[in-house]
Amino acid sequence: MNLIIFGPPGAGKGTQAKRLEEKYGARQLSTGDMLRAECESGSDLGQMLKSIIDGGQLVPDEVMVKLVAFAIQDEACANGFNLDGFPRTLGQAQELDAMLSEAGANIDHVIVLEVDDGVLLDRIKTRAEETGSARSDDNEETLKKRLEVYHEQTAPVLPFYEEKGLLRKVDGMASIDEVTEQIDAALGAKVAA
Ligand code: AMP
């Protein structure tokens, strides 16, 4: 099963993506984690990426598309994948569509976690306090920028999948377990349909 999990920053995509991998074997592909690993390598590319990420901006589509094209071909995705953090622009969605059709594959479900901006700001502040700010982009200023970018560039991708009948909206403000239950129900409903 090939999945995409969408949601604004702090919506809990990563937590749910991990559960999707455990339950359905769909390999979690977190583009944020891939980029952070590159940043930590200290390479020139990593330094360039870090300044983009810390500014709350998006990494260029060409870089992201190459990264994902490589990742989905990995053997670890033999039972499918769940994309956590990609696509984030319409261009990325179109490129993904093209690369999957070429490979004779497709996306089965697109899950979107819906959360109010005010709730997200509170969550990110708590995450920064609890983790001692493990992520350098978990601060109020960067979050505001990331939310702005989500609404401007990522939310417009949703109609692309809605038109294909793949979109599954979930209340991301419910508890973590309730969100998981809603996702299971949404996937089950689609499978049974
Ligand atoms: P995340 O961990 O998914 O919140 O991603 C952290 C940051 O990595 C984002 O704020 C972006 O700067 C960058 N990033 C992750 N995925 C993408 C993507 N698909 N396109 C562009 N930038 C991305």
Image (spheres, grey):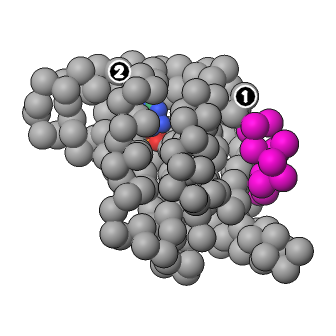
Side of 38 where 99 appears, left or right: right
Helix, strand or loop status at disc 2: helix
33 lies left or right of 188: left
Q: Is mark 2 within 8 Å of ligand 1?
A: yes
Q: Position of residue 154 (x, y in %)?
A: 63, 30
**Which comes before the other along the chain, label 2 or label 1?**
2
State ligand 1's quadrant: top left
Measured as percent of width and height from the top left, residue 133 is found at 33, 41
> Residue at (40%, 27%) from the top-left corner?
62
As drawn, 53 above or below 134: above
Q: Tags 2 and 1 in contact by the CB under 8 Å rule?
A: no
Q: Which residue is mark 2?
A: 52
Please say whether residue 192 is visible from this viewpoint: yes
The CB of the residue at mark 1 lies under 8 Å from ligand 1: no
The magenta-colored residue range is 158-172
- Residue at 66% across / 20% down in the picture? 152
**x and y, in percent, of residue 14 in the image:** 49, 56
Quadrant where the N terminus is found in the figure: bottom right
- In the displayed structure, 106 sits above or below 119; it is below
| Residue picked out by circle 1 | 156
Rendered image quadrant of residue 43: top left
Q: Secondary structure at mark 1?
A: helix
Q: Nearer the viewer, residue 40 or 3?
A: 3
How many marks overall? 2
For residue 98, which quarter of the picture? top right
- Residue at (40, 46) in percent of width and height: 69
The correct choice, above or below, for 33 with respect to 56 in the image is below
User: Which amino acid type corresponds to the residue marked 1 in the rendered image?
Assistant: Pro
Work out which residue is located at the far right of the displayed protein and give it: 193
Q: Is residue 164 magenta?
A: yes
Image coords of residue 55 (percent x, y):
39, 19
